[in-house]
Image (tube, grey):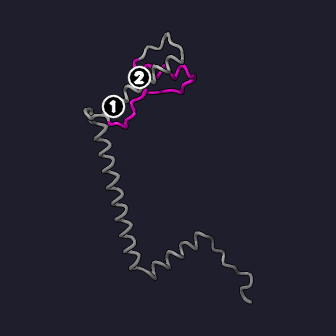
Amino acid sequence: MLFSVYELNIGGSEWFIILIVVVIFIFPTKITGFSRSIGRMIGEYEKARTKISSQKNMIISDPFTKPSKHDYAGPNIQRPISSEREKLELIAKSLSIDSENMQDDELRILISVKLRESQYKGNK
């Protein structure tokens, strides 16, 4: 019992390094094929990413593009809205409705009528 107190004090990261070294020595041809396939996957990903990015930039930079049916055409909100009345006034303003002397219910009805009209015009 020469080494009765000796223990292998190898942590997780050391086992990982040992495993990588063993795999490199046992499967060198498999590693090259695997690394090639990983490289191809990364290359395809980069190509797709740049293609999507260039298409997005082309659409954003073209001022003559027609808005699609699914584009957001609502009000541009820059801050939190504190009350229901403020929300109604903001929507009314975006629809060119004068909301100054109207009650909330009247304003809701007029907003819903305007939105239905704009949807009807959009579907034609």
- Dividing the image into 4 quarters, which one contains the C terminus? top left
Q: Farthest residue in the bottom direction?
A: 1
Question: What residue is drawn where x is 27% and y is 32%?
Answer: 63
User: Which of the two labelled residues, at mark 2 and mark 1, occupies the earlier sequence position?
Assistant: 2
* Most foreground residue, 24 or 56: 56
Q: Is residue 62 above or below residue 37?
A: above
* Most foreground residue, 74 or 32: 74
Q: The disc labelled 2 sits on which kind of residue? A: Lys
Image position, residue 10 (x, y; %) = 63, 74
Q: CA distance from mark 2 to mark 1?
A: 12 Å
Q: Farthest residue in the left direction?
A: 64
- Dividing the image into 4 quarters, which one contains the N terminus? bottom right
Image position, residue 104 (x, y; %) = 54, 17
Q: The disc labelled 1 sits on which kind of residue? A: Gly
* Most foreground residue, 47 or 67: 67
Residue 58 falls inside the magenta stretch: no
* Most foreground residue, 90 or 28: 90
Is 23 on the left-hand or right-hand side of 82? left
Q: Farthest residue in the top direction?
A: 101
Question: What residue is drawn where x is 33% and y is 47%?
Answer: 53
The answer to which image quadrant residue 72 occupies is top left
Is 71 on the left-hand or right-hand side of 106? left
Image position, residue 40 (x, y; %) = 34, 65
Q: Residues within 10 Å of mark 1 (few under 14, many from 20)?
A: few
Q: Residues within 10 Å of mark 2 (few under 14, many from 20)?
A: some
Is 105 on the left-hand or right-hand side of 117? right
The residue at which mark 1 appears reads as: 122
Q: Considering the numbered disc 1 on the image, is that residue within a helix, a strand or a loop? A: helix
The residue at which mark 2 appears reads as: 114
The answer to which image quadrant residue 14 occupies is bottom right
Image position, residue 123 (x, y; %) = 33, 33
Which contiguous range is marked in magenta?
Answer: 68-96
